[in-house]
Image: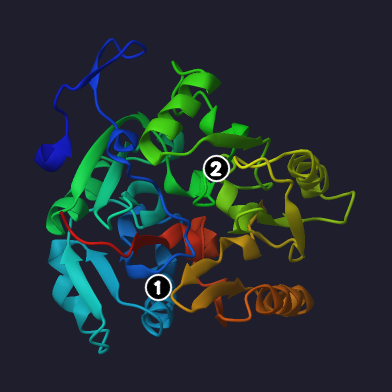
Amino acid sequence: MKDNCIKKNIKYNADEERYAMYPKDFNYKMPAEWTSHERTFVSWPVQESMCYPEDHKRVCEGYRALIEAIAEFEPVTVIVNPDEIDQVKSLFEAPQITFLPIAHNDAWLRDNGPTFLCDDKGNRAGVNWRFNAWGGKYTPWDLDDQVAPKILKSFNIKCFDAPFVMEGGSIHVDGEGTLITTEECLLNPNRNPNLTREQIEEYLKHYLNIEKVIWLKRGLSGDETDGHVDNIACFAKPGKILIQVCNDPKDENYEITKENLKILENATDAKGRKFEIILIQQPPMRKYNEERLTLSYLNFYFVNKGIILPTFGESATETDHMAEQILSVLFPERRIRTIDGMAIIKEGGNVHCTTQQMSMGKND
């Protein structure tokens, strides 16, 4: 299936002791998420892979609401297991929602889907990262590891095969050369035990065409992804970062977010700029079956002229309102579209985790 992926020999890479070629060699780079999208991709949930399969109906209702919310702003392509495609199609009426039959094990497309790239002429490409279900936590994942090249082939988009494990939710970029991530995730031995921090940085620079990596320490307490950055911090624009914080010293997130905030306060981006940092207060702690749920407003998703924001209700009503107000002031040109953040959170993720943007460009 990876026959559209770049494998030809062009340049010697001493670290890998083989020949390789990279997106950077062709001036492809990962755009910032707030740039214009051609469409959003979402994978439909698979009951067999769910932590709580008895919640399948509610989770599907949550996905349906999310897909319809995104479709208010831009086209959506839903990845569906082939034997379910007629059933899933019958749930939707909007013409801007289309369906692509691709077999998959799980529904977190941010992590196993392609990372889309563009060059300065508007040509698109994509990176196919290796995927191992967040460090081998869930089996099987063989189908998920094939989703990215199948999407790219379906849209006739050039594919670059990356020789290391990475999930899309573990990174954010500003579009001007800076990437943020966490040590907890990318340096975790359950991903790439044979790679050093420096080697991982070099791969990120080659495949995403970035210049600088800012390493935060840990992700939020209870995050089974081993600290994905899309729950704790993101760029609002170049030179400006949003971070979720905790003010309760008894909460484990207090020290986690305090440490990450200090790193950002002392950091500069690829252009040498100090960051303007905007704080968003975390929602109150919530548990299910004695396990903490990873509630995050930073798991929002940019869409064309809007933002899809998960909110959590009940004890979180006050912080829900605060988060919506902060984003409304920060992005006055965008409509803040809230969505029930509790619909799928028990499965381990939220809005940003389920989505993958295809930036505007032209097919090769």
Residue at the spot of label 2: 179
Residue furthest to the bottom in view is 93
Q: Residues within 10 Å of mark 1 (few under 14, many from 20)?
A: many
Viewer-nearest residue: 177 or 225? 177
Instruction: Tell me: residue 287, above or below residue 336.
Output: above
Say which mark, if any, is on residue 267.
none
Instruction: Tell me: residue 224, above or below residue 63.
Output: above
Q: Is residue 131 left or right of residue 35?
A: left
Q: Is residue 210 left or right of residue 44?
A: right
Q: Residue at x 14, y 63 (%)?
A: 82
Viewer-nearest residue: 103 or 160? 160
Q: Is residue 293 left or right of residue 115?
A: right
Q: CA–CA distance between discs 1 and 2?
A: 29 Å
Viewer-nearest residue: 251 or 139? 251
Residue at the spot of label 1: 63
Element marked by disc 2: strand
